[in-house]
Amino acid sequence: MRTVDVAARAAKRTALMDAAARCFAERGYSATRTADICSGAGMSSGNLFHYFPTKHDVLLALVERDGEQTSEAMTDLAQAGDPLAALLSLLDEICGLAGDPVYSGLALEISAVAHRDEEVAARFKANDLTFRCGLATLVERAGDAGQLSTDLTPEHAATWLAALVDGMFARVAADPDFDPSAQAPILRRIVTQLLVGGTE
C-alpha cells in the first residue's frame, strides 16, 4: 500500500474517531447512530465500517487513544527537572480539558459505560492506573527533591489527586456554571496544602 494511501486512511480513521467523540459526548453512546458519526466526519453513511467493525469498536479505540495520550504525557512529565511544578502544571492542563465540553462529556460517558461493559471497564481501569502511577512518580520525585512535607505515601497521594480530578469532572457535569479553568488556582492551592502544607 502506498504511503499516501496509508496516510489518507489514518486521517479518515482519526476523523471518524473525533466525530464519534463529539457524538458520544453530546448524545451519549447508546443514542449515537453510526450514521451520526459518519455525518459528523463529513462522510457518507456506512463509511465507518471500512475502519471499524462496530460502533463499540470506535468507543474502544477512543478509550485506547486516551490511554496512549495519558501514558505519553506522564512519561514526559516524569523527566521534568522540577517535579512539583510539573505536577501543578499538569493540574492546570487538566482544568482546561475539564472545561472542554467534548473532552469532559466523553470522559464522563466512558466512565458511565464502563460500569456495564467489561471491555470498556478493563481499558478504563488500565488508563486510570497509568494516570495514578504517573502522579505517584511525580510525588515521589518531588519528595526526593525535598519539595514536599507530607506523611502520605506517593501512591496514597496519587489516589487523592486522582479523586480531586474525578470530582472536578463530576462537578462540571452537575453544575453548568462551574468553570474549571477559573478554579485552577484553587485546585493548585488545595494540592499544595495537601503535599507541602502551605500555600503556593
Image (cartoon, grey):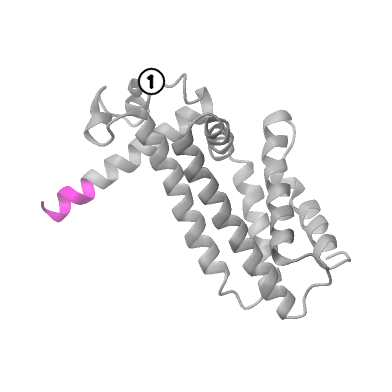
- Residue 150 lies, in percent from the top left, at 83, 68
Left or right of 198: which side holds 122? Answer: left
Location of residue 154 (image quadrant): bottom right
Q: Relative to 123, say whether 110 is above or below.
A: above
Instruction: Name the residue beneath numbered marker 1.
Output: 33
Q: Compared to 126, does 53 lie above or below?
A: above
**194 in magenta:** no
Residues shaded magenta: 1-8
Amino acid tagged 1? Arg
Q: Nearer the viewer, residue 126 or 44?
A: 126
Identified at 47% across, 45% down, the residue is 123
At mark 1, the secondary structure is: loop
Left or right relative to 120: residue 39: left
How would you rate the neighbour count of disc 1 (Cα within 10 Å): few for under 14, some for 14-19, many for 20 or more?
Answer: some
Residue shown at 51%/50% (left/top)?
A: 126
**Residue drawn 56% across the image and 75% down it:** 79
Q: Position of residue 34 (x, y in %)?
A: 34, 23
Q: Residue extending furthest bottom? A: 145
Measured as percent of width and height from the top left, residue 200 is found at 83, 65
Instruction: Indicate the quadrant where residue 36 lies.
Output: top left
Q: Residue furthest front?
A: 118
